[in-house]
Amino acid sequence: MQSIQQIQEQIIDEFDFFQDWSEKYQYLIDLGKNLPEFNDINKIDSNLIKGCQSKVWLSSSFDNNIVIFEADSDAIISKGIISLLIRVFSGHSPNEIIAANIDFIEKIGLNSHLSQTRANGLLSMIKQIKIYAIAYQAKN
């Protein structure tokens, strides 16, 4: 299994392949389209991420000290962003998630190409993922 850092480096390499931001945005949209189907049962208020301009749902499950995340969004860019975050964090232990230094967002230049509201939404997504991890860590 790849570490969180290795997955981030893989994402950085993938984005480095594209020359300009229109290509990178298209790749981000394609990633969002490839998100696994999110069950409508999970589209409930308690799974909505607060602080996102668009609707982003995040649900998690915990088994064998591994956190699995599932998500969806009604906005294509947000869906791409949450798909990247799921790829980075899902399948790891709460300790790994909490300790992770998330630097790929800056290294691919995403933070400087998002509107202020999307950037705030991105921070809210990461915060919610870490909150789930802290809750599961406390259960253990």
Image (spheres, grey):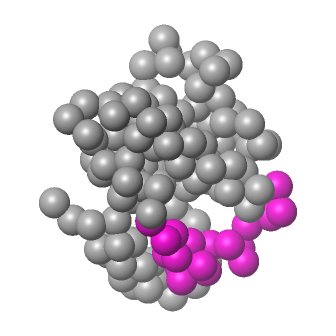
Horizontal relation, residue 25 to residue 6: left or right: right
Q: Residue furthest left?
A: 1
Residue in the image at 74% along x and 43% along y: 52
Q: Residue at x 65, y 29 (%)?
A: 48
29 left or right, relative to 78:
left
The location of residue 114, given as percent across then percent down, is 73, 67
Where is residue 6, by image quadrant? bottom left
Instruction: Check the image and report above or below for 24 versus 91.
Output: below
Is residue 91 visible in the rendered image? The answer is yes
Residue 22 seen in this snapshot: no
Q: Quadrant of the C terminus?
A: top left
The answer to whether residue 87 is magenta is no
Does residue 99 appear to the left or right of 22 in the view shown? left
Give the percent coordinates (x, y) of residue 63.
25, 31
**Residue in view at x 26 percent, y 40 percent:** 65
User: Which residues fall within the magenta stretch?
Assistant: 100-118
In reply to whether residue 112 is colored magenta, the answer given is yes
Observer-nearest residue: 45 or 21? 45
Residue name at image x 49 percent, y 71 percent: 101
* Near-viewer residue (26 or 123): 123
Residue 1 appears at what percent x and percent y? 16, 60
User: Taking 6 as reference, is 68 above or below it?
Assistant: above
Where residue 119 sits, quadrant-wise, is bottom right
| Residue 44 occupies quadrant | top right
Q: Is residue 118 above or below residue 134?
A: below
